[in-house]
Amino acid sequence: MQQLRRVLLLALALFFPLLAHALSLEEGLKIITERGRDVKIAQSDEDAARAAVGLARSPWLPWVDLYGRETWLHYQPEAKTPFGAFPTSQGQFTTYGVRATQLLYDFGKTSSSINAAHYGLEAREIETRRARNQSALDFIIAYLDLLESEKLLQVAQDEVNRYEAHEKDTSARFRAGVITKNEVLQADVLLSDSQQRFLTTENLRSVRASKLNSLLLRPLSDTVQVEEIKTNPASGITLEEAWAISEAESFDLRDIDARIAAKEQSVQSTRAEYLPTLYASGGYEYLENRYLVHQDNWSVIAGVNINLLAGGASASKIGIAKSELRSLTLTREKMLDNIRLAVKAAHLDLQSSSRKMDVTKTAVAQAEENLRLQRLRYREGVGTATDVLDAVTLMTTAESNSWKALYGVKRAEAMLLYFMGKDLTNIYGK
């Protein structure tokens, strides 16, 4: 009964795509890069940076104030004359008006702030693309992990089948009186052990499927089937080529370059606080006062403001900005080294996995032939049970190593392309 259950579960895991739609890598990447949580968070930060550009531009637009107030005076204003005191205003009066102020020139303070905001927006746009690329990498790795677990599940099932076949051979030879009961017991124990490994691999496949569902914002228990990936987009890339591409296209480097440019503009904007600000202002005001000839009036003012002393605030802001700029510059140098190191590690991993894959192809064929011969020798009575069991173990190891090497190559390719700054969605989503 347990054997039937395993066969049915494996059939569902491996052949369900023939009956239901399998999720392709392209479909999954489209979902994760458009609706993924990390992408949505990055887009929200990008919207905030876009609003900051409008805030930085606001000093160039008119400032319009509408005001109104009611005044109560304890003493009514009066003027002294040789003929006595005469009132000049009411003791209670209403004032209202409107005033518009327009900045004319501030020697680059506002324009530098606008440039800094634009560079900040550029950095956020790059961060959104980086978050989308990171989400794509996470999905590709999870997708490959699930593919690998399905192949390992098939290997585990094949191992169970081989141990069952050996158990049948030992039982037949025991009934014939050729071997002792000990060999039958040994075969039963090893069969039970392989069945437990099958269950462990089955659980691994389930966990990896749940992880893929989580990335796709689906219920964790949903059934998910995946298609094989046949492309090798990173084949033939040398380490020097990978380094050159990463320095030119890395999202992290482009992001910090934009932030450095924004900070440089911020320093210029702060320095402009020492320079004059030219402005014009105009408006209309009504002052309720029956003692005045004209209770309402229009006005136009042209003025200049000069920051003579701000308690050291401007100098402190410049010092802070320069320190932050120096920190960003040093961070870029460190980041460049880290990227080069990551690219080299991924490139070496790709080469190593490729060599492993070449070796395991031969090993699988050799292990398969070895198992066939050892089973034949055992049935003919010239081989031992230990030889057969060792051959089964070698066969399982060779097949497992072969699949791990194959998907190790594909994972290393995705990691290398990511550290190079390539857009994984464009590469794998075609």
Image (spheres, rainbow, N blue to C red):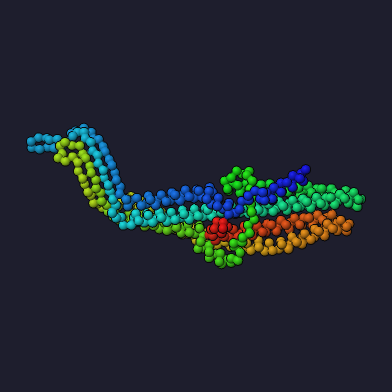
- Residue placed farthest to the front in the image? 19
Image point (58%, 52%), residue name:
27
* Left-right relation of 235 to 46: right
Image point (73%, 46%), residue name:
8
Count of picture labels: 0
Between 90 and 163, the one lying in front of the other is: 163
Looking at the image, is 298 positioned above or below residue 25? above
- Residue placed farthest to the left in the image? 83
Looking at the image, is 86 positioned above or below residue 119? above
Does residue 327 appear anywhere in the picture? Answer: no
* Left-right relation of 192 to 100: right
Between 111 and 143, the one lying in front of the other is: 143
In x, y percent, where is residue 259? 44, 56
In x, y percent, where is residue 107? 31, 57
In x, y percent, where is residue 149? 67, 52
Image point (65%, 57%), residue name:
407
In x, y percent, where is residue 376? 84, 58
Image point (21%, 39%), residue name:
287
Location of the N terminus (image quadrant):
top right
* Left-right relation of 312 to 157: left
Location of the C terminus (image quadrant):
bottom right
Does residue 215 appear anywhere in the picture? Answer: yes
- Residue placed farthest to the top in the image? 74
Between 261 and 323, the one lying in front of the other is: 261
